[in-house]
Image: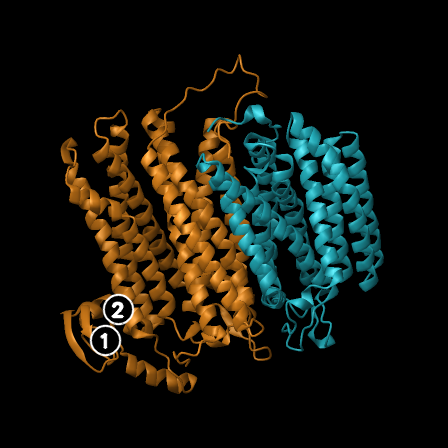
Chain colours: A cyan, B orange
């Protein structure tokens, strides 16, 4: 396999990992005002992701770094072209990250309420905007022959992209609810499980509509199979959530997110950012790539370190595998 | 060269944004780098001796470390995104070289740091003691390793090595990755930056310790604070010696690879041998008129070349040389900025070291310091190395101007063409507002938790009579 293809796959894998992991973080953040009826309950929700959210976010930083290193043209065009959406994502991630750490640092209710809002909006904004961004990557954006973005903000906000945003919003909400059902005890666990099923039905409709629309834009046999797999995994996950098989439910939503992202990347290949104007403007895994020498070095680094990272991150989840409930929340 | 008139364009704002967000980010990074190691050392001392004093200090400084850590993490994401968002032509030009250290930093260092910090924060009762100690060391190593990759990337901008320019694409391409990682600028900047970071961390340890020693002398924890104050003072003294040593080597390398920056550090317009170093200058810095200057003869020659009679090239001569080499243009940075930032860096750094000496002296042979002036000096202490770090970076980056990659690409050619003035003004305003708000919140929290002092150690609950599922978490957000 060519190294450019290897790196296309790696970038896809990194974003998939990011959406699976931070997907439930976002979901938990958005469900904070819904499932957390008092401060203790809200603390239970936050502490299900407390030890892991930071490590989860590094998947994004690694995906961005990998894009920069392996496909500088893609990174440069995408990040400058999607300027305002990315700005909003950054502001959201800043507010949210600080909120986790600072929320419990003072006892006043008003202090906590403000950070709760930061967690909610800091989770909801990226949950929508990542969908908008990836829908635009998939559909293509106006690029001139120099691969420079020539559209405006409104060119990124068409119905297909908004449906993409709605889909990621729904997927992350459902995924987060399922995660909470898996990681908590008592009342929160019951309500999270029930909510997951309700949210999941609407999400399934949005996801099927979005993936079908996507496949009319560009498609391949593999993409169709992956899209069908994504829909089935989501439905399987919901069925499992209904009968309180929480491990399977979480597996279902995680696989659904993975396959939905895979669908987009599979149909996109070998393009990485199509141009809706000049075909010469289209960025591909070849014309956006770094030199073979750089890719070779990066491949070695990835081959050696990725398994190590997966091992210790996986171990972290094992260490914190225990369910938590209001009885586990200390006074301070 | 760009003119500094009233006309503001997207380039100016993008530069201001990069400056503000980077200096801001680097207010938190030094504490993260230094304090992670100091907390790990304290925890190791507890582990080795079993003395609860060290456990209390570990938890106390660990709390301050975490308040700061969160800010470093979230402002770091902005840094990675900003190259693509605001400097897309730069990213295209150097991506083949510059992206690799950033990606490796994330994969090799940042995952390590972020994952193990989570294990450390929440793992007090979940991990065996040794493993929990290993977690803080892993996070500290990740943090320090991450600095290396970032500095290797920055050093390429100061002294590009291990690359060629592809004549077809006009882009820089990597030819020797090992050369990029062992860039001599990176090799000396790394210890310089680390030492500067320990200067900040040590100062914070001193400040907080000293305040408690002087305010609450006689309390049960005074011994712990006394220890912390001395420990921090020694960290400050040793690291300030290392800062000077590495800074000296850096000066010589800078004279060799970026002679214009060295000339700009002194505002030296004509080549001199020997060249003197002015401690301060009053008057115009454009070289036209000098009212008063306090000069130390031979010092600049020594700083730049190691020889008190060595030749240091002047701005005018370098300007003429660069104009013939690169074409017409102004190749000198803004001299007042480089001149003063260089001096502020040195001055603030030395001031912190001086206070550390006073603090140690005041506690000699078990004495308790009483001077109110010492307390005041102690309270401003962490601000001094923070300022020194900031001015150091301002000098490094402003001294490279007008280049974004020295000798290869001008800053004005690196900016994103597709980002409008309105967009960059929006982001600059948004970042400034959110950063300013968070700075106030963070500072108040640090003060609050610093005043609260070391925690009371609650005895660990007996394992036998409490069901694991019912037991409260050792730490919870």
Looking at the image, how many numbered discs can be counted on the residues? 2
Quarter of the image where the N terminus of chain B is located: bottom left
Q: Answer left or right for B316 relative to B371.
A: right
Q: Answer left or right for A193 relative to B37.
A: right
**Percent coordinates x, y for residue A18 in the rendering:** 63, 49
Q: Answer left or right for B231 relative to A309.
A: left
Q: Residue at x 60, y 47 (%)?
A: A123
Instruction: Please rate how many residues cluster around mark 1, counting C-alpha atoms within 10 Å: few if below 14, some from 14 to 19, many from 20.
Output: some
Give SS at disc 1.
loop
Q: Residue at x 37, y 34 (%)?
A: B60
Q: Chain of mark 1?
A: B
Q: Chain of mark 2?
A: B
Closer-to-camera residue (B258/A83)? A83
**Marks 1/2: CA distance?**
9 Å
Closer-to-camera residue (B306/A34)? A34
**Percent coordinates x, y for residue A76 in the rendering:** 59, 67
The reply to whether the C-beta atoms of the residues labelled 1 and 2 are less than 8 Å apart is no
Sequence-first tag of 1 and 2: 2
Q: Is residue B122 above or below residue A300?
A: above
Residue at which label 1 appears: B311
Give SS at disc 2.
helix
Q: Is residue A137 above or below residue B134?
A: below
**Percent coordinates x, y for residue B400 in the rendering:** 38, 71
Please tell me in which quadrant of the rendered image residue B311 appears. Answer: bottom left
Q: Answer left or right for A322 relative to B462.
A: right
Closer-to-camera residue (A183/A262)? A183
Residue at which label 2 appears: B304
């Amino acid at each position: 396999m060519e190294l450019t293809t290897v790196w296309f796959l790696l970038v896809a894998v990194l974003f998939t990992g990011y959406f699976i992991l931070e997907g439930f973080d976002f979901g938990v953040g958005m469900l904070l005002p819904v499932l957390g009826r008092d401060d203790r309950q809200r603390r239970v929700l936050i502490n299900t992701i407390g030890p892991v959210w930071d490590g989860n976010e590094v998947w994004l930083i690694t995906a961005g770094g990998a894009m920069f290193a392996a496909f500088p043209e893609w990174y440069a065009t995408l990040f400058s072209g999607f300027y305002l959406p990315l700005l909003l994502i950054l502001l959201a991630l800043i507010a949210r990250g600080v909120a986790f750490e600072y929320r419990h640092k003072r006892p006043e209710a008003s202090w906590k309420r403000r950070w709760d809002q930061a967690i909610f909006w800091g989770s909801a904004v990226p949950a929508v905007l990542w969908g908008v961004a990836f829908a635009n990557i998939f559909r293509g954006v106006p690029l001139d022959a120099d691969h420079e973005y020539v559209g405006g903000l409104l060119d990124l906000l068409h119905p297909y992209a908004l449906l993409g945003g709605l889909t990621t919003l729904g997927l992350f909400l459902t995924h987060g609810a399922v995660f909470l059902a898996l990681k908590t005890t008592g009342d929160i666990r019951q309500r999270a499980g029930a909510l997951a099923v309700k949210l999941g039905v609407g999400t399934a409709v949005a996801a099927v509509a979005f993936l079908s629309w996507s496949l009319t834009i560009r498609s391949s046999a593999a993409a169709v199979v992956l899209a069908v797999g994504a829909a089935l995994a989501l439905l399987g996950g919901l069925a499992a959530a209904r009968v309180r098989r929480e491990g399977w439910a979480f597996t279902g939503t995680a696989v659904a997110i993975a396959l939905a992202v895979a669908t987009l990347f599979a149909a996109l290949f070998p393009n990485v950012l199509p141009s809706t104007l000049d075909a010469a403007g289209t960025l591909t895994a070849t014309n956006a790539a770094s030199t073979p020498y750089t890719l070779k070095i990066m491949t070695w680094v990835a081959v050696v370190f990725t398994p190590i990272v997966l091992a210790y991150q996986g171990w972290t989840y094992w260490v914190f595998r225990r369910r938590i409930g209001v009885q586990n929340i200390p006074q301070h | 060269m760009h003119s500094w008139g009233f006309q503001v364009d997207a380039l100016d704002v993008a530069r201001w944004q990069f400056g503000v967000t980077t200096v801001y980010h680097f207010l938190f990074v030094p504490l993260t780098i230094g304090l992670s190691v100091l907390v790990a050392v304290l925890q190791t001392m507890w582990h080795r001796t079993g003395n609860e004093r060290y456990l209390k200090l570990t938890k106390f400084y660990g709390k301050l470390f975490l308040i700061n850590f969160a800010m470093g993490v979230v402002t770091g994401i902005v840094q990675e995104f900003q190259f693509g968002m605001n400097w897309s032509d730069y990213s295209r030009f150097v991506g083949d070289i510059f992206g690799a250290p950033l990606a490796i930093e994330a994969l090799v260092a940042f995952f390590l740091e972020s994952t193990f910090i989570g294990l450390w924060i929440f793992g007090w009762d979940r991990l065996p003691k040794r493993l929990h100690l290993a977690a803080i060391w892993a996070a500290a190593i990740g943090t320090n390793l991450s600095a290396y990759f970032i500095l290797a990337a920055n050093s390429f901008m100061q002294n590009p090595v291990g690359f060629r320019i592809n004549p077809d694409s006009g882009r820089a391409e990597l030819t020797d990755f090992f050369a990029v990682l062992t860039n001599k600028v990176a090799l000396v900047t790394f210890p310089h930056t680390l030492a500067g970071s320990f200067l900040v961390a040590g100062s914070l340890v001193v400040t907080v310790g000293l305040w408690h020693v002087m305010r609450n002398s006689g309390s049960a924890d005074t011994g712990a604070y006394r220890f912390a104050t001395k420990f921090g003072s020694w960290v400050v003294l040793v690291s300030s010696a290392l800062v000077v040593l590495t800074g000296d080597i850096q000066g010589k390398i800078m004279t060799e690879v970026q002679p214009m920056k060295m000339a700009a550090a002194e505002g030296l317009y004509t080549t001199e041998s020997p060249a003197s170093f002015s401690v301060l200058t009053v008057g115009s810095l454009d070289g036209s008129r000098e009212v008063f200057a306090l000069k130390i003869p031979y010092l600049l020659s020594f700083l730049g070349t190691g020889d008190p009679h060595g030749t240091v090239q002047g701005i005018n001569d370098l300007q003429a040389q660069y104009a013939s080499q690169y074409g017409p243009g102004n190749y000198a940075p803004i001299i007042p900025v480089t001149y003063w930032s260089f001096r502020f860096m040195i001055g603030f750094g030395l001031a912190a070291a001086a206070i550390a000496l006073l603090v140690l002296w005041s506690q000699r042979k078990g004495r308790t310091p009483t001077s109110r002036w010492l307390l005041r000096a102690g309270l401003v202490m962490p601000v001094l190395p923070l300022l020194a770090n900031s001015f150091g970076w301002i000098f490094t980056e402003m001294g490279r101007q007008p280049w974004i990659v020295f000798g290869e690409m001008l800053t004005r050619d690196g900016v994103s063409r597709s980002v409008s003035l309105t967009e960059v003004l929006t982001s600059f305003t948004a970042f400034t507002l959110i950063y300013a708000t968070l700075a106030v919140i963070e500072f108040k929290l640090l003060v609050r938790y610093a005043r609260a002092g070391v925690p009371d150690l609650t005895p660990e609950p007996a394992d036998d009579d409490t069901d694991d599922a019912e037991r409260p978490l050792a730490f919870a957000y």
